[in-house]
Image (cartoon, rainbow, N blue to C red):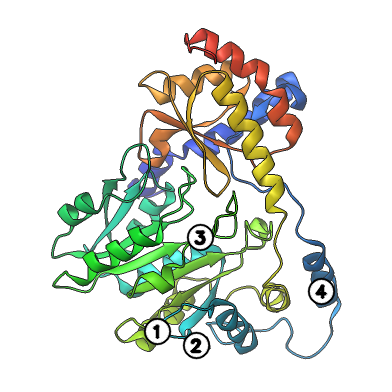
Amino acid sequence: MVSNKMAQAMEKGSFIRKMFEEGNRLRALHGADKVFDFSIGNPDLEPPAEVLTVLSEQAAATGSGLHGYMSNNGYLETRTAVAEWLNQPGLPEPVTPDLICMTVGAAGALNVALKAILDPGDEVIVLAPFFVEYTAYIDNQGGKCVVVPCLPDTFQPDLQAIAAAITPRTKAIILNTPNNPTGTIYSAETLQALDALLQAQPQSIMAISDEPYSAIAFDGQTVPSTLANIQNMIMCYSWSKSLSLPGERIGFCAVSPRCPNAKQLAAACTYANRVLGFVNAPALMQRIITHVLNARVDVARYESRRNALYDILTSCGFNATCPAGGFYIFLKSPISDDLAFADACARHNVLLVPGQGFGYGGYVRLCFAVPDSTIAGSRSAFEKIAQEFSVQQS
């Protein structure tokens, strides 16, 4: 019998997955070329050629223990390579391999980090809009989610609101830069100001940074290092987006060497990796990642798609924020009810995700990690949607 808690969670469901299923229904009804699905952040670019080459080599490799258990925090060779990759100029102290735990993607890393630090009832601040699963991850580990809205328009963290939300039970704050769904990159100045705020508190508050999009930045920008700018940090990373490997579930969490009791915290993450049932990150993917840390998908193609979709939306008169990174455009709904607006878009075979799914109503999210033909073909549909809602076209 399903627990009441799970039954309620399934009832609420996920707007993203619901729209994904609606896309399948509409494609079967109208044909794939007549449906413009911007709902789910599933990279459509192939992994870099060098990744596929190393994958083939490692899959064909023979030898004793290649597919067996290793230490719960992962192969030492892989953790050493990741530590060297992280240790860029400007980092106050070097990350060492014993501070890294290889995980089943960034989602696994987030659950591991939260399990390592939370006692029942501890509070975790999340900045709205946020990736909806954060609330479930916090609940998984016995914590309480405290939602703090970001600054309107810029979507940078609101430091005054964060300060007001801190209580004696606050244990952590989750950061996501570039942000899903807004594409906002948190500035170095903002990160440093947040660090000063956290350091001024009577208790230790951990920043947990979710960084699957940190390699996807546009207009020549780079994403400021959270490890360099925040002292008490656990960085959670995934190669799902930077190498187009979302189905392979490979990532890591790295404890900042500046954390109090950093090695004990890293050991707790390793223990959590085991008892949460992950046991260890996939052996094959660890061996592959070791050799391709500097590979990247063609970010320029994503930037081109961003430009094309942003141009369509704004030329139709919609109010959209041009994202600095990531896969998404956060569009202000022309009506206050973003769910009703998303439903109306679906009637035009345009699928997007209501902002309510990210804890921030009045907006919708569109993913531009889709074929160029999907973006180009959507123009007439957006023109009709704009006309339906009396949006003034430019």
**Mark positioned earlier in the residue sequence (1 or 2):** 2
Determine the CA span between mark 3 and mark 1. Answer: 20 Å
The crowd level at tag 3 (other Cα within 10 Å; few <14, some 14-19, many 20+) is many
Residue of label 1: 257
Q: Earlier in the sequence, mark 2 or mark 3?
A: 2
Q: Which residue is mark 3?
A: 223
Point 45% across, 70% down: residue: 235
User: In percent of the image, x 52 and y 8: which residue is there?
Assistant: 388
Q: Circle 4 — which element?
A: helix
Task: Name the spot of residue 379 as percent of width and height, x first.
Answer: 66, 20
Report the Cα–Cα distance between label 3 and label 4: 33 Å
Of marks 3 and 1, the one in the foreground: 3
Amino acid tagged 1: Pro
Residue linked to disc 4:
59
Q: Kindly report the distance in space between the C-alpha atoms of the residues bearing marks 4 and 2.
A: 28 Å
Indicate the quadrant containing the C terminus: top left, top right, bottom left or bottom right: top right
Residue tagged 2: 96
Mark 1 or mark 4, whichever is nearer to me: 1
Q: Residues at badges 1 and 2 in contact (C-beta under 8 Å)?
A: yes
x then y, percent, for residue 284: 71, 75
The quarter of the picture where residue 385 lies is top right
